[in-house]
Amino acid sequence: MRDSYFRRGFFQHRGLIAVAAGGAIAETLLLTFLAPGARPLAPQATALPSIAAYHDVRWLFAGQQSDLVFGVAAVVLLFTRAGIDAALLRLAWPRPARPASGTPPPPAPSLPLAIASCATLTALAWLLLAPAVTLTFGAAVVPFSWPFLAALPLVVLITSVLGHGGLAHSWWRRLPPPAAVLWVLVSFGVLSLASAAMLHLAAIAAVGVAAVAGILNARAWYGVAGAVARLPHEVAEHPSLWRLPGRLLWWVPVAPIAAVLVVALAVGLVRLVFTGTIQIPAPGSVDAAAISAASRHAQQTVTSHVMGAVLVVAGFGSTCCDDTGDLRQADPDLTVQQFSYAGMDAAGRPLPQGGSADDVPLPLLGDRMAAQLLRLHDRTGLPVDIVAESEGTLGVYAMLDRHPGLPIGSIVMLSPILAPGQYGADGSQAIPQDALAELNGLIGSISPYGSSGAENLIRSVADDGAEYFSEVARHRNIRWMAVVPLADATTLPDCALPSNVLVVPEFHGGLLGDPGVQSTVRRFLAGLGIERSVETASQRLHTAVEAIAGVTEAWRMPVTRPLCP
């Protein structure tokens, strides 16, 4: 009985299983030796066509090459992918039924027709996925969660709408059958889990995971091919389509139009979120009761006992200089000054800041931060603590690298940018300048920061971010604490977090004004330990961070080396 089970249905397609698993194994072995940091992408090599297209376009986008080389590489990759997909399609097509078992399926598409259909699907998918890949690329240059959180749903929606692409007869005329969408979503889940597993396994075990993922890819191909084979032929089922109105409707590209609408809707929603028209509620506080108790205890213990100087560095898009009121009011003995990205006037006062004043290169940002810190130290005669958020943490890295020996007391990093410059001069790979321009233009078009976006900052992070971050991580021994929002796990390296990294279930940015986070910051600046209840809640989220980082590695840009500092 068991033997007969493995001789029917999916298990008849041994060629399909061999090619799908073999392709995933081959890329895993190749990346293990050449680019171990990108190994989680390997099982996608034989995934369904729309998912495989996303796999390919990220590799194409990641390379540094001239326009001519890029064009040649794109053509070669396009037809290589079309050939692989066409072979998998024909291997996955349902076998003719026995005479007594029902209506036989239609014959598989001819090889030339299958190649042409798959090439069309791949080219269309590349075009529609370009904004998502650009955002994903941005999250590798400046790793924070908002670009990736905008890109991932876009990728899932586009690949789902094109889930039957390349397989169905005239697939572009119709929306995918429900089974095709389901198999795309199942494939996303399987490939995400495979990514999380492969990051922590030795090469041999990773090859085993890739083999299992490849077999499941084959099952997805078989499921979609079966669903497509059952679709009716429109003209045979609807003779009215031969008439002129029907003939015109016959050529309407329904699937591409639906995919374009998905892109337009996603970009519009991201724009509304950036501008604040749509407010996304945070997942919640670390532990409402714990934070409330910690806040009360901090106020009773810390107020009037914290004496020192604090330089507060807000994130991108902030203004100066009125964002320190909460900290100053809570601790009147503190001398609190807000950092100005615009610099200081002749009297040493921070200049008012607005617009794109914070779009400055990292070396200049580090220099200005050092100058304002020294000015505050001269005024108070005390070591200066730093509380920096988001972009401000990049300035901290640059300052510490360029100005050793500063009178710094301690550093608090809120929503820190960790492992910046994954693509750049000292990162894992070179970075195309055209890609930076496209990234900046896209961010400028969907954000409220204007068409200029953050060109100086992005280019500078690509050039210097990895060097500054690695230098600080290796050689500085400063008392510090980081508060990482859970959403940023989608762009963090899949590494174990130190104990002085607190995780809160929030989105990136906005922690500087969070009352619960402020109470923790005040305790840290006072030299007190973190409240046990807050620390316990954070430790529970460390596991969630590592799990999220693992599963999202599959959908990020390929990075050639491991990133754990």
Image (tube, grey):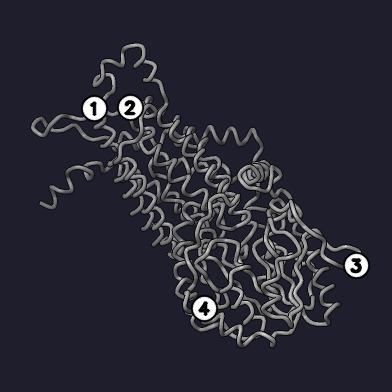
Contact flag, marks 4 and 3 (Cβ < 8 Å): no
Contact flag, marks 2 and 1 (Cβ < 8 Å): yes
Closest to the camera, between mark 2 and mark 3, is 3
Q: Residue at x 57, y 61 (%)?
A: 508
The numbered disc on residue 292 is 4
The residues bearing labels 4 and 3 have C-alpha atoms spaced at a distance of 41 Å
- Which residue is identified by label 1? 106
The residues bearing labels 3 and 1 have C-alpha atoms spaced at a distance of 83 Å
- Which residue is identified by label 2? 169
Q: Residue at x 46, y 54 (%)?
A: 554
Q: Secondary structure at mark 4?
A: helix
N-terminal label among 4 and 3: 4
Most extreme residue toward the left, as rendered?
Answer: 100
| Residue type, numbered disc 1 | Pro
N-terminal label among 3 and 1: 1
- Which residue is identified by label 3? 347
| Residue type, numbered disc 3 | Ala
Where 437 falls versus 381 (above or below)? above
Q: Report if residue 76 is visible in the image.
A: yes
